[in-house]
Amino acid sequence: MSNRSLTIGAIATVLVSTALLLLTPASAEEVKAGDLVISQAWSRATPGGARVGAGYLTIENKGSVPDRLVAISGDVAGKIEVHEMATTNGVMTMRPLDKGLTIDPGKTVTLAPGGYHLMLTGLKAPLKQGDKVPLTLEFEKAGKVAVTLDVQGVGAKGPGGDSSGGMMKKMPEHSGMKM
Ligand SMILES: [Cu+2]
């Protein structure tokens, strides 16, 4: 009898854990467009009167040919470009990618603090934590794709916000994610 209850207890525990896992929401919505999967679109709140902000996201190319992010638009800012961050003579600089951002087949490109980012210039209003910022990404092959940036706190290092653990948190701010 006691053995049997133990077994039933163990099975119940497994079932409950599985249910909890299934209930855990994804940290950001996934958007599919052709061969591309775009996820983890987020941004950071902008302090004070800052007129610039940054957007981050992950793009996976499940197809067999490269695609390229060539343009971004949105009402939130006067101009939105893809920037890359680099260290030149010991100084962190950033510059627009003139030819867009290429996503090779079978590869995932992550835009994250310290590396590639969407540069929002001429913000029409400060970005506040909890805001949802709609943007339209334009890819050479996949065409136009609507995404939404989830705005996290000022110091957030990843799409889950300040309180989430995970890989992003352990990475130094300027690790320069080259992918
Ligand atoms: Cu920039």
Image (cartoon, grey):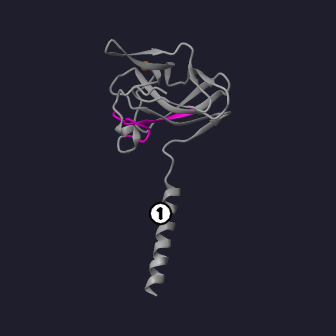
Q: Look at the picture and state if 153 lies above or below 85.
A: below
**Percent position of residue 43, x then y:** 44, 32
Q: Amino acid type of disc 1?
A: Ser
> Secondary structure beneath disc 1?
helix
Q: What span is colored magenta in the figure?
A: 147-161
Q: Main secondary structure of the magenta part?
A: loop
**Percent position of residue 4, x then y:** 48, 83
Visible residue check, residue 122: no
Q: Which residue is mark 1?
A: 17
**Percent position of residue 55, x then y:** 47, 28
Q: Look at the picture and state if 43 lies above or below 5.
A: above
Residue at image coords 41%, 37%? 158
Residue at image coords 54%, 12%? 98
Residue 33 magenta-highlighted: no
On the rendering, which quadrant does ligand 1 occupy? top left
**Percent position of residue 30, x then y:** 57, 40
